[in-house]
Amino acid sequence: MRINPRQLPQNLKQGLAPIYLVSGDEPLLVQECCDSIRAAARQQGFSERELLHAEANFDWGQLLASAGSMSLFAERKVIEVRLPNGKPGDKGSKALQEFARLASEDLLLLLVLPRLDRSQLNSKWVKALDQRGVILQVWPVDTQEMPRWIHQRLRAAGLDAEPEAIQILAERVEGNLLAARQEIDKLKLLSDDNLITADTMRHAVASSARYDVFGLIDRALAGDAENAVRTLQGLRAEGVEAPVVLWAIAREIRSLLEIGEKLDQGQPLSRLVRIQKRQPLVQSALSRLHPRQLEALLLRARAVDGAIKGGRDQDPWAGLLELTINLSGRRSL
């Protein structure tokens, strides 16, 4: 069974599965899902917990040995395996498939790993775990979903807020869910009547925005020039090097050229862009930017590269700003 975090509480009420695979790159949501599973297990009498870190050179025999050993004082046991790179290898794959065959109501496996791609989801070991348990896929909260997520968290904390106040918090903690949760906890202490106004939010919340180059690309592809520029400014303020930003932008421009060419040949977008959530972003960008425009952007990217290397009398960040605006579908001055 494959579910999302919103479905987890109801799923746990229906009874525990012997296996839970929690996959995602959003630390707060992954942590909260794991906490919920552990709490439900404790309520069901799983009094023993063993934690295994499956890093490089991990002996997967430990997993099966742990499954075969039980404390004298524990009737039920949770084995939590953290797999940082998301790839168990041949030995790990076999061990996980064997565990799926051994799974019982007195033994619970909680496997925590980064987001799985399509090939991993179709692997033998994932399918084996899927047949016996629950796969929980945790997706990041994007810019458009953030205000709704914040509103839900405020309501859960017994608070309400003006729409403008919610937007202020969303902008200041952009992409950083842990910071958002911390700010909501702080607001709960500061609030007298449980209604957060825009002025209260503006004065109470510090800027905790987490900017990243992939967020910059997604906003530009979506045509959201204002937030793309804000993200670029945040990257610069956080000390991200200009070559890193240029690499991401240039790579995306080349990718758009290649995808556009293959679309013209009749290939479907779903095959060219594997991540479903990115398909509308790519489609939006290609509807605005024609091949000649993309080729011109590549030439500008080369000029920015020359400025970074000192070969041109130009501020690289000014060039990156122009590229960001143009990739968003706007003309620069």
Image (tube, rainbow, N blue to C red):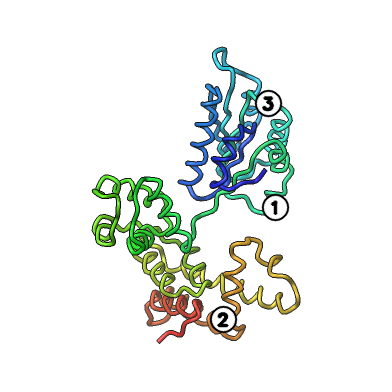
What is the tally of numbered marks visible in this picture? Answer: 3
| Extreme residue toward the front, this view | 193
Label 1, on which residue? Answer: 119
Identify the secondary structure beneath mark 2.
helix
In three-dimensional space, the C-alpha distance between marks 2 and 1, rounded to whole angstroms, equals 31 Å
| Extreme residue toward the top, this view | 72
Q: Is residue 196 above or below residue 290?
A: above
**In front: 109, or 166?**
166
Give residue 61's quadrant in the image. Answer: top right
Task: Check disc 2 and give the amino acid type.
Answer: Arg
- Using a 10 Å C-alpha cutoff, classify the residue at mark 2 as few (fewer than 14 neighbours), some (14 to 19) or many (20 or more): some
**In front: 52, or 274?**
274
- The residue located at (49%, 36%) in the rendering is 35
Q: Looking at the image, is mark 2 or mark 3 nearer the viewer?
A: 3
- Using a 10 Å C-alpha cutoff, classify the residue at mark 3 as few (fewer than 14 neighbours), some (14 to 19) or many (20 or more): some
In three-dimensional space, the C-alpha distance between marks 2 and 3, rounded to whole angstroms, equals 55 Å
Identify the secondary structure beneath mark 1.
helix
Quarter holding the N terminus is: top right
Evaluate whether residue 239 shows in this view: no
Label 3, on which residue? Answer: 104
Label 2, on which residue? Answer: 288
